Image (cartoon, rainbow, N blue to C red):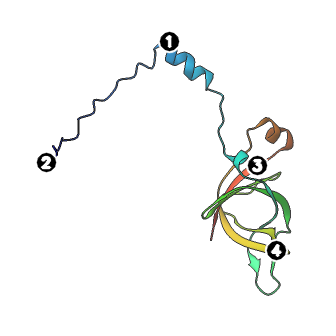
């Protein structure tokens, strides 16, 4: 018969945030900006902002260029050289083989890019919740 051991109680570790070694380590990481754009091959896209006229299939705003820089489940991250207001309904068009794939979504978050290249080019990052 095997013995059943109750789970051991974990004691909370106390952190001395003023400890010099920890302070030095934290200062080294102060300027780090983490994002995962490097793990996804960017794709050229067209971005249309606003509602869609179902009779003509054209949106109120004309297509503007952008890049799809990350996609997972129902979320896309796109970068543009223009701002988009939070809550905007947008349509993203991209090539899928010989045809155009269109997806619609709502902009849930937007911010200026923080990488040096982003700042130089006026890049804005937008998180889009796809429908």
What is the C-alpha distance between the residues marked 3 and 4? 24 Å
Query: On the rendered structure, is 118 left or right of 77?
Result: right
| Disc nearer the start of the sequence (3/4) | 4
The image position of residue 20, as x and y in percent, is 50, 12
**Nearest-to-viewer mark from 1 and 3:** 1
Element assignment for label 1: helix
- Which of the two labelled residues, at mark 2 and mark 4, occupies the earlier sequence position? 2
53 is higher (above) or lower (below) than 126: below
> CA separation, marks 2 and 1?
51 Å
Disc nearest the viewer among 3 and 2: 2
* Res 14 → quadrant: top left
- Measured from the top left, where is residue 111 in percent x and y? 70, 47
The picture quadrant where one finds residue 4 is top left
Check disc 4 and report the residue beneath it.
Answer: 100
Tag 3's secondary structure?
Answer: strand
Pointer 2 local density, CA inside 10 Å: few below 14, some 14–19, many at least 20: few
| Labels 1 & 4 near each other (Cβ < 8 A) | no
Question: Is residue 63 left or right of 20 when viewed as pictured?
Answer: right
Q: Position of residue 75 (x, y in %)?
A: 63, 61
The numbered disc on residue 124 is 3
Which label number is shown at residue 113? none
Where does the image place residue 119, in percent across and percent down from the top left?
Answer: 80, 39
Find residue 64 and report its image quarter. Answer: bottom right
Give the labeled residue for mark 1. Answer: 20
For the C terminus, give its image quadrant. bottom right
Tell which of 126 and 75 is nearer to you: 75
Residue of label 2:
1
**Lower sequence index among marks 1 and 4:** 1
Q: Nearer the viewer, mark 3 or mark 4?
A: 4
Instruction: Name above or below for residue 100 compared with residue 9.
Output: below
Q: Residues within 10 Å of mark 3 (few under 14, many from 20)?
A: many
């Amino acid at each position: 018969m095997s013995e059943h051991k109750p789970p051991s109680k974990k004691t909370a570790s106390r952190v001395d945030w003023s400890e010099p070694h920890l302070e030095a380590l934290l200062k080294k990481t102060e300027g780090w900006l983490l994002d995962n754009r490097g793990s996804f091959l960017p794709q050229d896209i067209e971005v249309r902002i606003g509602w869609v006229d179902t009779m003509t299939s054209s949106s109120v705003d004309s297509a503007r260029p952008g890049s799809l820089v990350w996609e997972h489940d129902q979320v896309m991250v796109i970068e543009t050289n223009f701002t988009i207001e939070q809550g905007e309904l947008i349509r993203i068009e991209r090539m899928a083989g010989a045809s155009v794939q269109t997806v619609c979504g709502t902009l849930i978050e937007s911010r200026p890019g923080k990488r040096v290249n982003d700042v130089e080019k006026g890049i804005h990052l937008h998180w889009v919740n796809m429908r």
